[in-house]
Image (spheres, helix red, strand yellow):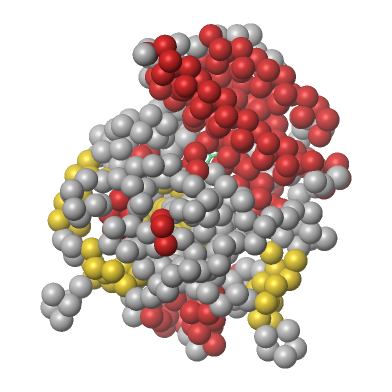
């Protein structure tokens, strides 16, 4: 019945909000107060800012807007408005201290349980299908991933731990040809899809080849060993200027010992570079240079999504490479269950019908595309989520990383960042246009 369905949705919303909150608490209780208020990098907020910002967005949308309740702390709205203060300036603000921030997010959440209990979860775009609740869960999880990136930047002893990634059980090499033709990009039907994923629209894509797997540490090391960071002809003009100015000589967090062996620092622990693990912490310009070196290119966003969603048997676009069902631990490395990408071949069950692996999870994949609206885009529920970023200096990333929760990772989900950024869990895979020889 309708009633039973609404109750099921309520339960799913509660579970999703609780999962996000458990993660937020985990990321903020494992370091001391000094570390919560410290700035571990000028490009990141103090963890205590993310914490209270999570509560403030939840208050704005769920308590005040959906719930129509009195504000909890209207006086602090400006402190946690991401557009008012740059990340570098946030430590100097009169922020809530860690105890106040914890109290605040707890108070807001208590009110949200009451709002959820009373919401019909239909009627009006904001609550239809639980959208606003889903949006806020995605917001919290996206900030959790940002906080995880802050953890990776902090120095000192490791405080996070997780079980090792599953071993590879399949051999995955080479590329997959995706046939020419139209496919449906974006979505009208996913109830929690954000504005930038909408609407569904047909896109014609020429036949292309895409790598069955992301580029690995071993492959990236071959580029480095071949002088990749010293050959301007492999880089775009902007990319080379950034390479020089930022002094890039390897992916972030790679270190070479006196014997010439490479190591990777991951959440405070040093590990020998894992050969078959997707490379992570590279910026778009490094991906571009690698692609030039390999004689290929990055996929466009449409190519990536077609590879991830197009089912050649039916012509339909699926929610995920493996079908329409939600992610599980056997399908994709998501949700911070592990603290690094898994080796290539670790998720054969998650491959697309055409045999493209690990599109969802492991690493965010840089695409060739800038962040632009789909035809028919409508900003919802606020311009500052997506619209103000369109046409800016951003490249789209797809697929989600080991640090992305499944609520904020799906076949249509779009992430974006500046092409110089690499503190995010970013990697890439290559594509190429087909030539007469291939056809
Ligand atoms: C979509 C990941 C680029 O973290 O800046 C968080 C998501 N928007 N709060 C970001 C977001 C508002 C956004 N990204
Ligand atoms: Fe935010």
Residue 231: % across, % down: 48, 85
Q: Quadrant of residue 354?
A: bottom left
Q: Position of residue 316 (x, y in %)?
A: 22, 45
Quick check: 423 above or below 239?
above
Q: Residue at x 51, y 20 (%)?
A: 10
Would you say 307 lies left or right of 180 here? right
Image coordinates for residue 79, horizontal then vertical, percent = 69, 30
Q: Residue at x 68, y 36 (%)?
A: 22
Considering depth in this image, is 314 or 285 the residue closer to the camera?
Answer: 314
Question: How many numbered markers are drawn?
Answer: 0
Q: Split into 4 quadrants, where in the image is the C terminus?
A: bottom left
* Foreground residue among 287 and 181: 181
Taking depth in this image into account, of 355 and 377 the one nearest to the observer is 355
Name the residue rendered at 56%, 54% in the picture: 402
Q: Quadrant of residue 196?
A: top left
Image side of residue 183 versus residue 63, left or right? left
Residue 387, image quadrant: top left
Residue at 38% x, 29% y is 191
Q: Position of residue 417 (x, y in %)?
A: 49, 52
Q: Decide: is 104 above or below 37.
A: above
Does residue 223 appear anywhere in the picture?
yes
Q: Does any portion of residue 413 appear in the rendered image?
A: no
Viewer-closest of 317 and 111: 317
Q: Is residue 262 above or below residue 298?
A: below
């Amino acid at each position: 019945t309708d009633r039973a369905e609404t109750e099921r949705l309520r339960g799913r919303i509660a579970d999703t909000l609780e999962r996000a909150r458990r993660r937020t608490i985990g990321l903020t209780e494992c370091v001391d107060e000094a570390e919560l208020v410290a700035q571990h990098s000028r490009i990141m907020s103090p963890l205590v800012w993310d914490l209270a910002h999570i509560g403030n967005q939840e208050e704005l949308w769920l308590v005040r807007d959906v719930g129509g309740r009195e504000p909890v702390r209207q006086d602090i709205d400006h402190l946690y408005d991401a557009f008012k203060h740059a990340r570098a300036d946030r430590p100097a603000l009169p922020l809530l201290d860690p105890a106040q921030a914890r109290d605040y997010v707890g108070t807001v959440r208590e009110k949200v349980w009451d709002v959820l209990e009373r919401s019909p979860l239909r009627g009006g775009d904001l609550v239809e299908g639980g959208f606003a609740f889903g949006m806020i869960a995605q917001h919290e999880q996206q900030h959790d991933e940002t906080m995880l990136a802050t953890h990776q930047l902090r120095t000192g002893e490791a405080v996070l731990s997780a079980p090792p990634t599953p071993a590879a059980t399949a051999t995955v090499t080479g590329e997959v040809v995706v046939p020419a033709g139209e496919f449906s990009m974006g979505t009208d039907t996913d109830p929690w899809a954000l504005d930038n994923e909408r609407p569904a629209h047909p896109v014609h894509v020429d036949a292309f080849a895409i790598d069955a797997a992301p580029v690995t540490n071993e492959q990236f090391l071959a580029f480095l060993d071949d002088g990749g960071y010293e050959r301007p002809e492999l880089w775009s003009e902007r990319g080379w200027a950034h390479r020089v100015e930022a002094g890039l000589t390897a992916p972030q967090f790679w270190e070479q010992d006196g014997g010439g062996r490479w190591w990777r620092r991951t959440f405070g622990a040093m590990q020998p570079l894992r050969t078959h693990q997707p490379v992570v912490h590279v910026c778009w310009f490094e991906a571009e240079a690698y692609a030039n070196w390999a004689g290929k290119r990055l996929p466009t966003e449409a190519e990536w999504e077609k590879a991830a969603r197009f089912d050649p048997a039916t012509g339909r676009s699926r929610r995920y490479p493996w079908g329409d069902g939600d992610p599980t631990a056997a399908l994709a490395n998501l949700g911070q269950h592990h603290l690094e990408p898994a080796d290539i071949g670790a998720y054969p069950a998650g491959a697309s019908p055409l045999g493209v692996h690990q599109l969802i999870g492991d690493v965010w994949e840089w695409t060739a595309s800038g962040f632009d609206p789909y035809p028919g885009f409508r900003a919802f529920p606020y311009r500052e989520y997506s619209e103000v970023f369109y046409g800016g200096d951003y490249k789209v990333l797809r697929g989600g990383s080991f640090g992305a929760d499944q609520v904020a990772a799906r076949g249509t989900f779009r992430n974006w960042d500046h092409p110089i950024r690499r503190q995010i869990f970013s990697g890439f895979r290559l594509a190429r246009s087909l030539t007469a020889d291939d056809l």
